[in-house]
Amino acid sequence: MEDVAIIGASMTKFGERDTWIQDLLAEAGIACLEDAGVSGDAVDHLYVSNMASGEFEGQTGTANALAHDLNAMPAYTQRIDQTSSSGGAGIYAAWQSVASGASDCTLLVGGEKMTHRTTSEATDVIASLTHPAEYKHGITLPSFAGLTARAYLDKHDAPRESLAEVAVKNHYHGTQNPHAQFQKEVDKETVLESPIVADPLRLYDFCPITDGSAALMLVPESKASEYTDDYVVISGIAGATDTHVVHQRPDPTVMNGVVESGESAYEMAGKSPEDIDVAELHDMFTILEFLQMEGLGFADVGKAWEHAMEGTTYIDGELPINTSGGLKSKGHPLGASGVAQGYEIYKQLMNEAGDRQVDADVGLACNVGGFGNCVITTIMEQA
Amino acid sequence: MEDVAIIGASMTKFGERDTWIQDLLAEAGIACLEDAGVSGDAVDHLYVSNMASGEFEGQTGTANALAHDLNAMPAYTQRIDQTSSSGGAGIYAAWQSVASGASDCTLLVGGEKMTHRTTSEATDVIASLTHPAEYKHGITLPSFAGLTARAYLDKHDAPRESLAEVAVKNHYHGTQNPHAQFQKEVDKETVLESPIVADPLRLYDFCPITDGSAALMLVPESKASEYTDDYVVISGIAGATDTHVVHQRPDPTVMNGVVESGESAYEMAGKSPEDIDVAELHDMFTILEFLQMEGLGFADVGKAWEHAMEGTTYIDGELPINTSGGLKSKGHPLGASGVAQGYEIYKQLMNEAGDRQVDADVGLACNVGGFGNCVITTIMEQA
């Protein structure tokens, strides 16, 4: 198994973008080539993380088109879909291509164009990942989140305010990130008084609909020095599934895919939760940040909400979580989100995170597909 | 790099299937587990090759659902889309997962459900892989095929009948394959008098719209003996792209993705075209069989049509091509086709091909995405 290094990264401005998927992908792809100092024709494997350009725009074949746009032909190319964790799945695929020895230079680009569709249309495309037996009963991803939040607050006697604190923190972090969709702070009262979406969750408990893309460049660590003196290594990476039918889970407040992928990634990296200096978690809904903190061992089960109340996950706290603003504030262009998590951890470990820089040698990204249906956890370290 | 073995394979009956994508995938998945003698919970990586269940059925998340249906949780799972070569891309992804050392047991299932949509609707979904600049001018995949066939016949002074011979041969082969959609022979006159679709190509020059699925089970060769004494190894595999905008190719009768992926796969396997005993080529249109025979070195450039006229590619010929009936007669459920090519080569090398058995130690499968936009070539050998 080849050790794998990341030698470049990029992301576009997230938000409403007046363009189409192909130009979004090319924008991040070109920026990543520039960041890594690699020309398109040096890329031998090109992966595109994208959930639904066919449904959103009637356009497929995006990976082939991107190879063309980046002058990467005859590089092998392929699209990766793992619903909302397509980006994390892309990191895993890109890692495999290098770790297997098949590739000397893999470019991963994740992207999604969504804002030209209504929120209801976008929610329906995303809900197509659920089991029809649940969907027929009116279940969408936001419904799952509301039901789970209610169960969590009840089970652990947690205050509703603790969820609001996640939104407040991640909006604050977003103000430090020029790429984030939202650049504004919100206070707890605003979150708690915003319109109900899926009780007890309200508008500000949810990530927005977003356009954007992000990219990473991976090479064998044995060849990284040909490109740069400073790079990051992927020391642990693993994915795991949970039941596809969410109501079959013994405890809806535990995401087994998070637990299993985390344990495997820690084992591979030889690390434990205490070793992690900075983390990007998949806060598509505020409640998910709690479930991942507990599943990954950053908080005891039932206690993540206390960290939120105490503020230990702020950028200057004990374990900074979602310094990028998270999906909540940075935005959630499905196929891009996991790649953008990788971008944030890379930038933090490279000391290139600007106003939101933290002191970190080891970082973790957790990308959640569906409602925990498949989760990919990646651990990165300074070389 | 771990050497990779195939220890089991399955495919469903191809044709019109009154079911949905999830049950099609489960049918092949369960059959492959049985064929390999592996239980679902031993699978650690599960890949699903599928182009467009979202567009065809409004259903996504199929990989997660399949992990659930096969009791493979917490196996990592992901969908792979490389348009009409999604199946070959799946073989490559599954190979990478084992070759990288990440997986001890990977199940690949490819499938597509299409026949509930009209031919025009299905053609439009497939055409969404083209560049909009070409699509706006009325280009679909069948149009490309017609234009290319005309160019080939003109350039090489080849008779129109030679294309008909491909259809006649592959229909004959299909009569030997109980899984094939069509179980009937056609004669040359029937092909040449069938309705024009894209001049000079007629109805019988095209593959049908098909439902179906197929599966392969991959393990490290070092562990294959734990499962079976007889298996097949993947000795060469590679993918390559060509221009996404087809009219930018210097010569439309040469598919550079075929040439490049073939050369890389031969080099990896230490084989040359003369070493191949049986091949499955992507005959979505009759003309494609010629372009792949030439691109892979089975015929000199401009001479593949002579082999068709001489009958050397029949099951009892010098190099049997598409003993399964090919896409032409077996059918072309997009995500399944490349996996089903792998199934056929595996069965031939295992001496389990029944009435269509040939004498073969080394086989090759070539799966073409788009109109040669991305091609995956796989070489397999008896262990």
Image (tube, coloured by chain):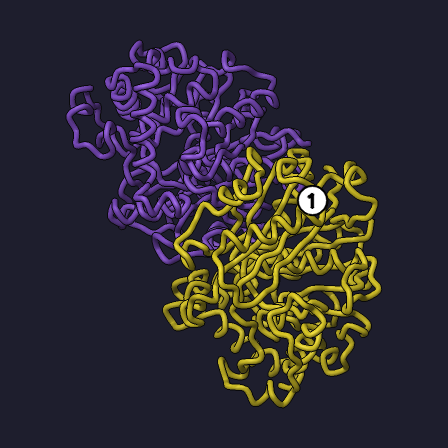
Chain colours: A yellow, B purple
- In this rendering, position of residue B337 left or right of residue A144: left
Q: Is residue A346 left or right of residue A253?
A: right
| Type of amino acid at the residue the image marks with label 1 | Leu
Q: Which residue is mark 1?
A: A218
Q: Residue at x 60, y 88 (%)?
A: A190
Along the line of sight, which residue is nearer the eye, B233 or A368?
A368
Residue A21 visible in rendering: yes
Q: Position of residue A251 (x, y in %)?
A: 58, 70
Q: Residue at (54%, 15%) from the top-left corner? A: B272
Q: Chain of mark 1?
A: A
The count of marks equals 1
Where residue B136 appears, x then y in whole percent?
34, 47
- Residue A197 at x, y percent in the picture: 49, 81
Answer left or right for A56 relative to A34. left
Residue A186's x, y, as percent?
64, 83
Label 1: element kind: strand
Up the image or down, A123 lies above or below B322; here it is below
Q: Nearer the viewer, residue A70 or A338?
A: A70
* For residue B374, above or below residue A280: above
Q: Could you tell me which residue is drawn at 56 percent across and 61 percent down?
A: A212
Q: Could you tell me which quadrant the C terminus of chain B lies in?
A: top right
Q: Is residue B350 above or below residue A7?
A: above
Q: Is residue A80 left or right of residue B300?
A: right
Asked whether the viewer can see residue B113, the reply is: no
